[in-house]
Amino acid sequence: MQVHTTIENFPDSVYTVATLGTFDGVHLGHRKLLEQVRQSALEHGGQSVVITFDPPPRLFLQANSLDLRFLSTPKEKICLIESCDIDHLLMLPFDEAMASIDPETFVRSIFVDALKINAIILGYDHHFGKHGQGNIFTLKALAPTYGFAVEKLDAADFEGAVVSSTRIREAIAGGEIETANALLGRPYALRGLVVEGRKLGRTIGFPTANVQVNYPWKMIPANGVYAVQVRLGNEEFTGMCNIGFRPTVGGLGQTIEVFIFGFDRDIYGRKLAISFQKKTREEKKFPGLDALKEALYEDERIIRHYFSVLSV
């Protein structure tokens, strides 16, 4: 997949099929849309194009909001879209100029003049252009003038409800990680650097890696203990992760701590990927370190059993 940050000199094709969206999380609904774009391009011997923005429009338009969170970082989004076998990703900067483009100018300047699209496939609820005034009906009205085909893809459905990034964010915020994973079609993951902590875990037999997520708008799962899979380079492990404020030991800020089963190496400064499988309990304040240690042994027993059942 070729990644572009400008519409200048975009490669021509005998047939270009495009789609447009934020694609936060690249969930099952997004994948359904991207597969349709890919298949349509293949049928016509052409190229598939995904158009998205960095930063996401909501982040630019609501810059002062303190509660904006996203399922994927820009780098994660690129990797996820690439995994869908798309030919081109156009990742345009979203700024004041982009926010002020009216829908028809957007269609003419980007879809027609720059990309020379033959067809566009859009999700059921996507809006574009100034104040989000453009939609599927705008495209259908402009299609005869500019000579492209328009197709609307219906929403993907899961257990009677629409698959959406909003629904997934709500599930993650509520600790319903298994629901979020089902809607994503994969385990939700955090990536970050291992940084030094207070090293209290070592004193009770549970040395943890403290992970710092450097994308400030990344959605962090609800506080609690989770069964996780951990990737370090090309190595994969299982373990348990605590997200929270460590009330038993007087923690002052939220941390992400991972105890990796069967692992005892210095990995400060290394990058970890944590894939969340199941929330096993809420964060609790224990009367002391001995009670905390007993709880951690029980957490380990439960989570090791969880993974042993999965592997059968």
Image (cartoon, grey):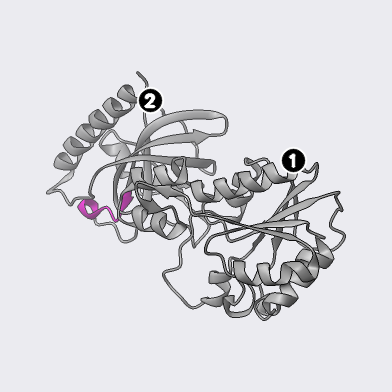
Please give the range of residues in magenta: 243-249
Indicate the quadrant where residue 220 lies. Answer: bottom left
- Identify the residue position indicated by label 1 in the image: 43
Residue 244 highlighted magenta (yes or no): yes
Q: Quadrant of residue 133?
A: bottom right
Q: Is residue 175 left or right of residue 66?
A: left
Separation of residues labelled 2 and 1 (CA atoms): 50 Å
Q: Amino acid at mark 1?
A: Glu
Q: In front of the other: label 2 or label 1? A: 1
Quarter of image, res 162: bottom left
User: Quick check: 23 left or right of 156?
Assistant: right
SS assignment at label 2 = loop
Q: Is residue 35 left or right of residue 108?
A: left
**Apparent side of residue 223 relative to residue 115 in the rendered image (left or right):** left
**Residue nearer the viewer, 251 or 35:** 35
Q: Residue at x 59, y 45 (%)?
A: 80
- Tag 1, which secondary structure? helix
Considering the image in quadrants, where does the N terminus appear? top right
Query: Residue 127's x, y, as percent?
Result: 58, 69
Task: Name the mark on residue 262.
Answer: 2
The relative height of residue 286 versus residue 305 in the rendered view (above or below) is: below
